[in-house]
Amino acid sequence: MADEAIVNASGTDTPAVHDGSGGEDGVRRRDFINIAAVSFAGVGGLAVLVPLVSQMAPSADVLAESSTEIDISQIAPGQAIKAVFRKQPVFVRNLTPTEISEADKVPVSSLRDPQTLEERTKPGKTNWLITMGVCTHLGCVPLGAGEGEVKGEFGGYFCPCHGSVYDTAARIRKGPAPKNLEVPPYEFTSDTVVKIG
Amino acid sequence: MSFPWAKEYKPSHPLMQWLDEKLPLPRFVYNAVGAGYPVPRNLNYMWNFGILAGVCLMLQIVTGVVLAMHYAANSGVAFDSVEHIMRDVNWGWMLRYAHANGASAFFVVVYIHIFRGFFYSSYKPPREMIWLLGVTIFLLMMATAFMGYVLPWGQMSFWGAKVITGLFSAIPVVGTPLQQWLLGGFAPDNAALNRFFSLHFLLPFVILGVVILHIWALHIPGSSNPTGVEVKSESDTVPFHPYYTAKDGFGLGVFAILYCTMLFFLPNALGHPDNYIQANPLSTPAHIVPEWYFWPFYAILRAFTADFLFIPAKLMGVLAMFSAILVWFFLPWLDTSPVRSGHYRPLFRKFFYLLVIDVLVLGYCGGSPAETKYVLISQIAATYYFLHFLVILPIVASIEKPAPLPFSITQAVLGKDDQTAPAA
Amino acid sequence: MVRLFGPLVGLFFAVALLWSFGVGAIQAIREPEPATAVQKFHLAPHEPEPGFSFNGPFGKFDRAQLQRGFQVYKEVCSNCHSLHFVAFRDLAALGYSEAEVKAIAKDWSNKAKVTDPKTGDETQRDNVPADHFPKVYYAGTGNPPDLSLVTKARHEGPEYVYSLLTGYQDQPAELLKEFPDSKTPDGLYYNPYFANLNIAMPAPLADDQVTYGDGTKATKQQMAADVAAFLTWTAEPKMEKRKQTGWAVLGFLLAATVLAYLAKRNIWAKVH
């Protein structure tokens, strides 16, 4: 369409043409104006897309809720809680010394996603395992954080959707998931409060 | 479907050839708004408003679909969700102002389009169907705009819904059950809000469908023109593209400047402050007024203050308000003058300008508080409104002596036409 | 058919309208609507001297003024009026740092209400930046409106807020003389900028009611102007971005339209 506008505008094949215009230069200048006008329309059309596309990105209120503070004082060793971080579950688990040593026993090189428990926790707080409760396979919530839930054969978490099994450091050991449960950015603001995000 | 000299679509690119064979969509566009559609060469800027109305419809659909991604049609949170759009959604404020002012822009454009039709008698044969479809579009637009205005669930939304659905209660016997059925309750609430949202989303696509029929019907006789003389030969026309695409492009630019000035600098000028107060069923605003585009009809509604014969005033108002639009459906048969264009109809022209003033007066009164002076003025103005369409137009058509018409469009434009005997 | 019935319908409506007109006109002459105190004594709102910085197509908020206005809201208005559509995080736009916003939220005396999911008990906690200003519940007479949108919910909103806050006065003697029935009822206060002249809110501002951190003298007019500016921001926080975007868009459209005009003239040059 746009091309035709330019062809026609240069006066080649329109009816009822009384061509009183000058030579080549005149034609070129007029072509230029038509091209420029059509280009402006194109740029304007693209600019309109910017708000239409970006309105779908997270809004200010969603972004404002991108950090969560959790009170961990009530979690006894061997227990875990589910909290919500960015509208997704996060597992905060107080590991027992047995669970820690079990995790440390595993040769790192044998793992699918090699990481030590120390790398996945904060120094001096190795017993606090904080991970997203989102299976790295397809995003289901693994079992094992709630009371009485199946922890799987490695004592960590078990995802019922497709059978991924995580160990006591929430590392993937068996099943289709490619990665260990993700450790979100967090810090201890005090001994009993942890701020995630 | 078109004049014999209309150019045929000849795709040059092999891809377009291939597509044209399988699905002649390029051919369709070419014949609809391309070089394959010959259009009278003398269309003035009044003929820009059809395309502009189409642009407004698309603008409303696009911004509306996007707003619906963030809006929540629940009377508990609707107002909050609109403020969420205004404050938190990326570019949400712009999208909402674009939609709200887009509705006004749409009506400005359509009113000019309609009054162009009045002046040039675009409704006359062979274009009655285009006109009938056009009036249908206008009715659908009014319904859509009314329901859209309810969605923010502000005070005017709520009381507008209450008053307008209250009109149905004027109908004898079935009125009150009908009103309750429309609202899904005894007063506007969640049920009404939800169905209004659903219909507000649906109707624009119905409008789009009728618009397609409107344009289809237009392409059968082709566009009318300011002389009202039908196209006689090829020299009377130019191809739509590039001539009218270029002219419409310029018109669109002017429109966009005016529209964006409103959108970015006076976004609330056409709205009512009370709609920034959340709906409160226990407190009525001091003056309930609809949006400006309903004012003339609202004035007609309010003009009936006394019972007439055995008919209650309220019912008369409702009947008259609907009749004020329905009368347009009968225009092609009320105005029987053989001459179309107001340029050649001296008497008609005077009454046309009187009608324009009359509708502006009605609009002013409709937007004013219900004080006696405004009601009295709108009674006179509404009287003229009905007389104009139903009495004056038929009489003018029979007594008027029209000015001489040009032989052809070409003669009107160039002062001579080779087809004619010596030019006048 | 249409030409037979059309005029009849037209005449029917015309006669009905003229009947209404006649009835109304006679009534208007017999019993003219009496003038009301509101018609005679209500005043249109006006701007403070020297005007608001945010008015006009190039207008911008004055950040220092917004902060002062927020202080007035916090220390005076927030006792009765909600600001529910605004979140604490939004205050960053007034020039407060992240830590300051957090402190404002934490120290806000009206705490966030939460329901304990185990017991169902209503408890409260400190506000966080992501929270909206908690709703204020008011037990006294009157319904203090939420102020988030008040400047958009009144004609000439910012001017209205300013005029109302500075407009308290004794009821004029002429008013009482002319309309003896219109005496301001007990518990209400005369204010010519309020729609019905009698407002339930007592005059909220007095000179030096707050102490501004930036040394600005807290006259009644100054505080009223500051809080009006603040409430303009709460109602339209995107105003500056809107105007900026508007100028960019208009500049582009102007250029595009000039080009479109030239292109149109080129194309039509051949047929005129």
Image (spheres, rainbow, N blue to C red):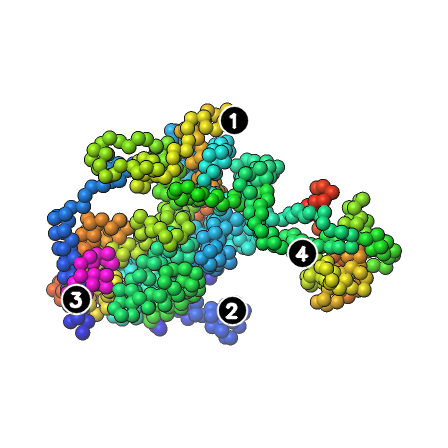
Indicate which label's residue lies in the foreground, 4 or 1: 4
Q: Are marks 4 and 1 on the same chain?
A: no
Whole-percent x, y for residue C268 in the image: 36, 55
Indicate which label's residue lies in the foreground, 3 or 2: 3
**Residue B414, image quadrant:** bottom left
Which amino acid type corresponds to the residue marked 4 in the rendered image?
Answer: Pro
To which chain does the residue with label 3 belong?
B
- Contact (CB < 8 A) between labels 4 and 2? no
For label 2, the residue is B16
Whole-percent x, y for residue C75 in the image: 49, 34
Question: Which disc is residue B310 wearing?
Answer: 3
Which amino acid type corresponds to the residue marked 1 in the rendered image?
Answer: Asp
To which chain does the residue with label 4 belong?
A
Give the secondary structure at mark 1: loop
Q: Residue at x 23, y 39 (%)?
A: C181
For label 4, the residue is A89
Whole-percent x, y for residue C78 in the image: 48, 38
Q: Residue at x 55, y 38 (%)?
A: C108
Whether residue B105 sits left or right of residue C233 in the image: it is: left
Give the secondary structure at mark 4: strand
Question: Which disc is residue C214 wearing?
Answer: 1
Queried whether the magenta region covers residue B102, the answer comes back as no
